[in-house]
Amino acid sequence: MQFSYLQVKLRLIKRFPWHDISMDLLKMKKLLTLLMILAIIFLNSCAIVGGIFKAGVWVGILIVVFIIGIIIWLVTRSGKS
């Protein structure tokens, strides 16, 4: 006689009532699955990619400003010598 994974889990929980953690994990797994399905339905992938590119643009601008600042600092420092 073969048992499914859920049947084995339920038998373990009945046998060891203190082993209640497995039910919490099962609830968490169901919740995460539901959240993933809702995210897939309601979040448009184009919006996600657009957000990533916006963040990338700002990081690029900050890096360029930082590098230009270093170059200006080096030029002014070498001019004093």
Image (tube, rainbow, N blue to C red):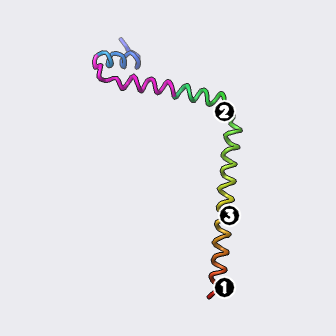
Quarter of the image with the C terminus is bottom right
Q: For mark 1, what is the residue?
A: 79
Residue 51 picture location, percent across and down: 68, 44
- On the rendered structure, is 15 left or right of 23? left
Which one is nearer the viewer's eye here, 49 or 68?
A: 68
- Chain-order first, disc 2 or disc 1: 2
Residue at the location (67% across, 58% down)?
Answer: 60
Q: Magenta residues, as a range?
A: 15-31
Residue 44 bears which disc, if any? none
Amino acid type, label 1: Gly
Measured Cα–Cα span from mark 3 to mark 2 = 32 Å
Look at the numbered discs 3 and 2 and tell me whether their residues touch, using CB distance below 8 Å: no
In percent of the image, x 53 and y 26: which residue is there?
33
Which circle marks residue 43 in the picture? Answer: 2
Q: Is residue 26 magenta?
A: yes
- Callout 3 amino acid: Val
Task: Give the secondary structure at mark 2.
Answer: loop
Residue that label 3 marks: 64
Indicate which disc, 3 or 2, sits on the residue closer to the N terminus.
Answer: 2
Asked if 58 appears above or below 11 in the picture, the reply is below
Residue 16 is situated, as x and y percent measured from the top left of the image, at: 28, 20
Q: Residue furthest bottom?
A: 81
Q: Residue at x 30, y 19 (%)?
A: 17
Q: Quadrant of the N terminus?
A: top left
Q: Position of residue 23 (x, y in %)?
A: 39, 22
